[in-house]
Image (cartoon, rainbow, N blue to C red):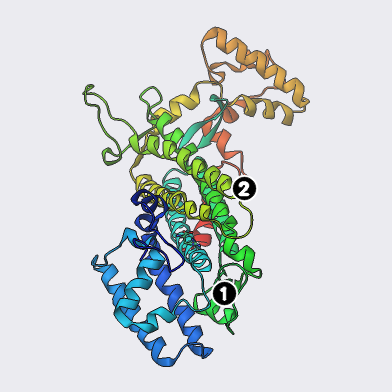
Amino acid sequence: KKGEAWSARFSEPVSDLVKRYTASVFFDKRLALFDIEGSLAHAEMLHAQAIISPADYAEIQRGMAQISQEIAAGQFEWLLDLEDVHLNIEKRLTELVGDAGKRLHTGRSRNDQVATDIRLYVRSAIDDITALLATLRGALTDLAEQHADTIMPGFTHMQVAQPITFGHHMLAYVEMFGRDAERMADTRKRVNRLPLGAAALAGTTFPIDRLRVAKTLGFDDVCHNSLDAVSDRDFAIEFCAASAVLMMHVSRMAEELVIWMSPRIGFIDIADRFCTGSSIMPQKKNPDVPELARGKTGRVYGHLIGLLTLMKGQPLAYNKDNQEDKEPLFDTVDTVIDTLRIFADMAGGITVKPEAMRAAALQGYATATDLADYLVKKGLPFRDAHEAVALAVRACVDAGCDLADLSLEQLRAFSPLTGEDVFEVLTLEGSVAARDHVGGTAPRQVREAIARVRTQLGR
Ligand code: ARG
């Protein structure tokens, strides 16, 4: 027991502070079921290779089944004295099945054991996140469909640029979250390799069958170098990097929701169940969920930098530093999963206010580019058309009116090429409908994009 000393080699126990400082059980117990899964696969192989007896293997299976039950029932007693999840489970196994439990660790080290556990954990997190990204994309696509024709101003530099549809705007995020899912899928390929068999760092003298264990655990391959297998955590860093990019997308969307919900803009309302009030100002309804998501993005970035820094100075192979990989990783997974779940839910709680969006699009000369394009189609070089429309906008600013408020006579003063048909291109509907190509904002294209995403999502 660690409370006493590690082994006969030690002459004194560690202090309580050192024990607490070096222990990880209170956070790595979250790996318990993966640890058991890995141990059972290892034991199965030891038995198949005649390294342990069939009776020992049966006993290990029996003990692990009971331990799994105890953990599920919340009855398993986790002991700080036993340092980590691995030693806690192994100790209990030995209590339950005796010598068979002591044979489990043959040809294995906690170094390859923990590397295996974390890979199983990250793989499962990736699968959960991938499913949630699909749910979120589906919810945003539903919202886009309801508003394939709803016109709003599109912005550059936060200034009104050109009219777009709200559906098109939502589909921009659907694209981003689609790439996030691709990044997760790509990361998964490198996560899904088996470290077990590397033992402490150099491999083992027992006639193990690593491919057999890989197959049992659903890994695509084994790690091909034992030193690399136990010491590298680049797969976890890659996962955190993909998570950081994902959260960056969430945060941009959160930022827009906050801005849109400001009464000064008033483009949307968010259902009360995602908002909170103020303890002093009775009138307040604050978009706390998007604000918190924007804030939590910072901690996910922090975990990425934390892990990169954790690894950068470590000589090969395993060092205890690696125990510090877990809390950042776990918090990244928790944060991303909670955020995606709440955003998928919140998408259905967004009420769009088309009148406010339309009114904003009507201000700010959103169709000025359409007027310039119109003149180009009548034969004017684009740069001259740009200048003619700039003069028209300036006149409107002075007069306090919109381009569509000018008479044909007034418009012809800026370019004699202007005809009766000009008023069609100055409407918001005409403007969006005219951008009718793949990736454009025309409602027809938005509907095609929605169909494409639905096919991708299989719904
Ligand atoms: N708790 C350790 C970790 O998380 C397990 C591996 C410990 N190995 C060792 N040689 N101390 O990394």
Inter-mark Cα distance, 2 to 1: 25 Å
Question: Crowdedness of circle 1 by 10 Å Cα count: few (<14), some, many (20+)?
Answer: many
Q: Tell me the residue that label 1 is attached to.
A: 197
Q: Do the residues labelled 2 and 1 touch (CB within 8 Å)?
A: no
Residue visible at 31% across and 30% down in the picture = 286
Q: Label 2 is placed on what type of residue? A: Lys
- Quarter holding the C terminus is bottom left
Q: Tell me the residue that label 2 is attached to.
A: 312
SS class, disc 2: helix
Q: Locate residue 91, reporting x and y percent.
A: 35, 72
Q: Which of 434 and 277 is in front in this view?
A: 277
Q: Which of 371 and 156 is in front in this view?
A: 156
Question: Crowdedness of circle 2 by 10 Å Cα count: few (<14), some, many (20+)?
Answer: few
Residue visible at 61% across and 39% down in the picture = 435
Q: Is residue 349 left or right of residue 38?
A: left
- Quarter holding the N terminus is bottom left
